[in-house]
Image (cartoon, rainbow, N blue to C red):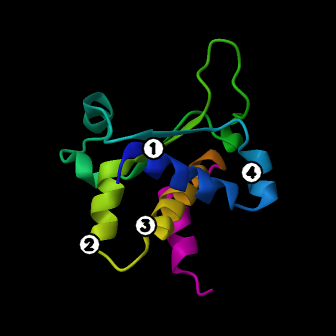
Amino acid sequence: MDADTFARLARAEYDALPDDVRALTADVELRIADTAPDDVLDEMDIEDPMDLLGLFVGIGLAEGGGAAHTGEAPNRVWLYRLPILAFQAGGEDTLQAVIRHVLVHELGHHFGLSDDDMYAIDDEPD
């Protein structure tokens, strides 16, 4: 799948989020890249770029973040297209479901949730 089509799917998944979530994340930029850059992988001690599906970069709401302040880059959620496509190809979930899961996970960091918090939420019965 080409980058433009992937970006449209990601935007559609963001647009389908509840209004209150979108209101609290309106200043978060949604970015797409094929894979994470080497410096990000090195910083996170990740050897295989296919192991990182997404990343939140910025200062979350719990840390006083939100709208960018002078001299600060805006908060961003990165979705890494090639790892997401590979992950989806190896499983049963639709591409839209995988994109939504990664997007919600990264937005969770904007709200101040840790990975452990989000895994606990994922493990809760519906």
On screen, residue 3 above or below 12:
above
Mark 4 crowd level (few <14, some 14–19, many ≥20, 10 Å Cα): some
Most prominent secondary structure in the magenta stretch?
A: helix
Q: CA distance from mark 4 to mark 1?
A: 22 Å
Nearest to the eye among marks 4 and 3: give it.
Answer: 3
Residue occupying the point 49% across, 66% down: 96
Mark 2 crowdedness (10 Å alpha carbons): few <14, some 14-19, many ≥20: few
Q: Please identify the residue farthest to the left as the structure is shown.
A: 47
Tell me which numbered mark, 3 or 2, is placed earlier along the sequence.
2
Label 3 crowd bin: few (<14), some (14–19), many (20+), radius 10 Å: some
Residue at 45%, 44% (x, y): give it.
4
Q: Position of residue 7 (x, y in %)?
A: 49, 47
Q: What residue is drawn where x is 53% and y is 74%?
A: 122
Task: Give the SS element for disc 2.
Answer: loop
- At label 1, which amino acid type do we have? Asp
Q: Secondary structure at mark 3?
A: helix
SS for callout 4? helix
Q: Nearer the viewer, mark 3 or mark 2?
A: 3
Q: Which of the two residues, 88 or 53, is positioned nearer the viewer here?
A: 88
Rendered image quadrant of residue 110 = top right
User: What residue does disc 2 label?
Assistant: 90
Magenta residues span: 112-126
Residue 22: which disc? 4
Q: Mark 3 = which residue?
A: 95
Identify residue type, mark 4.
Answer: Arg
Residue 84, horizontal then vertical, whole percent: 36, 57
Determine the CA span between mark 2 and mark 1. Answer: 22 Å
Q: Which circle's residue, 4 or 3, is located before the other in the chain?
A: 4
